Image (cartoon, rainbow, N blue to C red):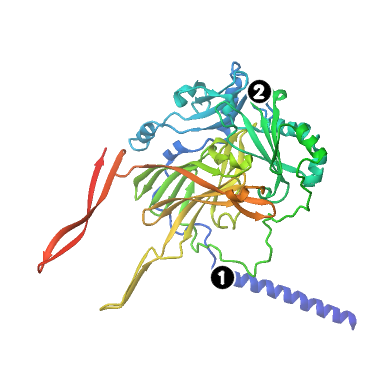
Amino acid sequence: MNSLLKWAVGLLVLFSVLLNLALIVGYSRRTPTCATRSVHAPKGKHEARSRVFADLSRDEYAQVQDYMLRQKELNISTRQSTRPDENFLFLIDLRVPAKSEVLAHLDAHGPAPRREATVVVFHGSTGFIKEYVVGPLPKPSDHRDVTAQDYKAELPLSARPVTIGEYILIFKLLEQRVFLPLAKVLHESFGADHKHRLNAFEQMPRGVRSGERKTWISFFRDQSGMYIQPAGFEVLLNHLSTDPSQWSVERLLYNGQYFESVNALLDAYRAGSVQKLSASPWEDYGSLKPRSRPLQVGPQLVSPEGPRYSVSHNHVLYMDWSFAFGLSSLTGMRVFDVRFKDERVLYELSVQEAMSVYGSVTPGMGMTKFLDSSIGIGRFAHELVRGVDCPYEATYVDTYRYIDVAEAGRYRNSICVFELSLGQPLRRHFADFFSHSYGGMVNSALVFRTITAIGNYDYMWDFIFYQSGAVEAKVHATGYISSSFLVAGSLKHGHQVAHNVLGNIHTHFINFKVDLDVAALRLICLSSMSHMSQLYVLQSELYQTVVVKREQRLQ
């Protein structure tokens, strides 16, 4: 009886499973699903000639690097551990052709401009920076020095950005000449030991006079969001020489007090003549981990019939829009040959610079004026997170870059493209006089985005293409503020944001290049508005209105 009961229960369970599977399959076939591909083909066709603006491919980077290494007279190294007195291949990037050559190719169907790469070499052996043009690509066969042509001067080696190889030497010097002699001071003051490290964050520019290479380095606790965890300790490092043994620590700042050497700080600390800091527990208040769980999942972007745009190589089609795109290691994202209804309205729209200027009573922040293109804006465009940085259904594009590396690297999903519902009508009208009617148009726009994490700041760069024919260049800053340790006089330069932490006053300057081509290649449009002027007399009453006086000149 028991075995019959077991068989009956087993058959019942099996029948239930099979019935559920059948129901799931049946209902899934009847349930409408979102299209993975566009139901309707996009307007226009992708333009193969737009590849004149395409970033270098991984193969092209490798070909340029191999060519430069074959030039024995240049004696170039690509090792990231290259010493400052050696010649280091720092940068390879696309050299965008001259506009006249590109337009002859795009509009007059002329030959494609010669494809070339810009190469920057730090010649440590001679003390100068050189910029070369290498081409044609693929299979480069020649190069030329364009430094004097492009910069009208020789570029001293002292003006170069700090490379990974130089950072290795700097950290080694700090360990041997600062951390080891001051181990007791750093432990008692900041709790620093083999488990609790202090991270370095340096000031720019590196000096106050041309030709200097002196850097104030501030130290922060190795915690989440270290940029708001200042320790109250800074050093001034002179690293001008190409011989690292000649580098020196010229000054130190401890709790707002200056010392001329490591030994001077150590002697004052032992003598008790310095206002000592006492180590406090390291608090992880800078973490981005949520403090509480969300109640429910938020809204998501969905395109029921698939995307209304198309991305092919470096070319985008969207409604009445089309454009080519790229990403410079130095300046960031850019678009070219932007057309609306087949008419070019922009030859180029590109990020050029992100600058931030700080104020502080301490030197690390007080002297800081970041020019992000000097270290590279586009080089910090990393993988975008689906559902956070961009919508899940966005189209993601990989990029390749060569800057301060041994070989070109691939950066997955570092650009995203998506259409965004703007949540408001493009235009609408509700009529309530004489008749009753309503008309409205749904509004959406195409977003072309990348995010560059440059130190403490994450800049979200958007080029937005509206159905009205307008284009918007937009940047949103997030990440962490830069901070300094709170000392006497600090509150004149910011606000306290945590215990002994000053959020320093600062301002941002963002520069875009906008090359408009509306109705002509060289366009100067001047307009002015006049004062109130007499227009007409009605029943002996004088009426005035505003007149717009326009002056326009096309070249």
Question: Picture coordinates of residue 184 (x, y %)?
Answer: 83, 40
Judging from the image, what secondary structure is the residue with disc 2 in?
loop
Camera-side residue of 99 and 17: 99
Which label was assigned to residue 242? 2
Residue at the extreme bottom of the image, as rendered: 1
Residue 225 drawn above or below residue 329: below
Question: Picture coordinates of residue 326 (x, y %)?
Answer: 49, 41
Q: Earlier in the sequence, mark 1 or mark 2?
A: 1
Residue drawn at 64 percent across, 34 percent down: 215
Residue 133 drawn above or below residue 392: above
Residue 128 drawn above or below residue 258: above
Residue drawn at 42 percent across, 38 percent down: 49
Q: Residues within 10 Å of mark 1 (few under 14, many from 20)?
A: few
**Left or right: where does residue 362 sit relative to residue 104?**
right
Q: Residues within 10 Å of mark 2 (few under 14, many from 20)?
A: some
Camera-side residue of 450 and 245: 245
Judging from the image, what secondary structure is the residue with disc 1 in?
loop
Residue drawn at 23 percent across, 48 percent down: 550
Kindly identify which residue carries mark 1. 31
Marks 1 and 2, Cα distance to the nearest angstrom? Answer: 69 Å
Visible residue check, residue 384:
no
Mark 1 belongs to which amino acid? Thr
Where is residue 555, by image quadrant?
Answer: top left
Question: Picture coordinates of residue 160 (x, y %)?
Answer: 58, 29
Mark 2 belongs to which amino acid? Thr
